Amino acid sequence: MASTFALPRCETSLKRTALRAVDLRGPAGRLEALLNEGASDAPAAALVCHPHPLGGGTLHNRVVYHAAKVMNAPEWGLCWPVLRFNFRGTGRSEGRHDGSAEVADVTAALDWLNSEYGLPIVIAGFSFGAAMALAASCGTASSGDRADLCALAALGLPIQGFGHTYSYPFLSRCALPKLFLSGDRDCFAPNQQLQQVIETAAHPRKLVLVPGADHFFTGCLSPMQKALATWLKEQFQ
């Protein structure tokens, strides 16, 4: 169900360079993060989670960057504050990669955004980041108590990868508005398997497959951005 929040007035003074470093305190120690500041009347804040660290994923990943740009850059019309961070053991974040404990890193980032802005939060993730975002939003005992979350976007949600099979049984009870945005040639989530997973998810939900796109949206970042922007604006009309 779409919310009644008004879209912000994107201020001409909001520059692409309105970027600041942030230190988050996660359960494994310091988490390196960057915040793109938003418009003063932004109705929401956003968190974007990066792909698998063992595959080179960081907060600077191209898909993560372009998704964050949709939610922050004035030309897209949203102008929200957007936080990106490095999971434990990635970049200058402390701790060691675990593969599932990173859910707690997402929770720490959500807590920081809530404390800093007190706004409804849109959480997005790409690949491994999408799996962790889903789990932090819907898959833990405490996630159902998060009144600050208002929407969830899973980009390139994996079904398999790095020797691991991902399952999402908690989606059946996840009442958040959910976008599943993938390429129709995603080798980590074949269409039929992805659709079977999404059919188990509670409504509201939406699946968008970008024609000709692989897992990384290679050569298809623009249609990915357009699909994400369209869905987000639908939630805030």
Image (tube, grey):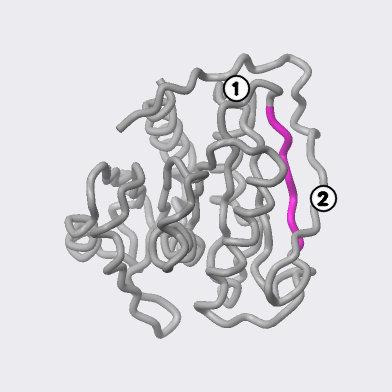
Q: Quadrant of residue 156?
A: bottom left
Is 37 part of what is drawn in magenta? yes
Res 75 → quadrant:
top right
Marking on residue 15: none
Q: Residue at x 38, y 56 (%)?
A: 214
Name the residue nearer the viewer: 128 or 122.
122
Task: For mark 2, give the secondary structure.
Answer: strand
- SS for callout 1: helix
Give the answer, above or below, for where 34 lies relative to 104: above
Question: In the picture provided, is 8 more to the left or to the right than 18?
Answer: left
Give the Cα distance between marks 1 and 2. 23 Å
Predominant secondary structure, magenta span? strand
Q: Residue at x 63, y 38 (%)?
A: 118
* Magenta stretch holds residue 86: no
Amino acid under disc 1: Glu
Compare residues 123 and 227 and report the one nearer the observer. Answer: 123
Residue beneath the point at 42% across and 42% down = 151
Q: Which residues are magenta?
A: 32-38
Side of 59 where 211 appears, left or right? left
Dot 2: within a 10 Å radius of its alpha carbon, few (fewer than 14), some, or many (20 or more) residues? Answer: few
Residue at image x 48%, y 52%?
Answer: 146
Q: Which residue is mark 1?
A: 75
What amino acid does circle 2 point to? Ala
Q: Position of residue 10 (x, y in %)?
A: 64, 17
Of discs 1 and 2, which sits in the foreground?
2
Image position, residue 144 (x, y; %):
41, 57
Q: Which residue is mark 2?
A: 21
Neighbour tally class for label 1: few under 14, some 14-19, many 20 plus, Cα within 10 Å:
few
Quarter of the figure that contains the C terminus: top left
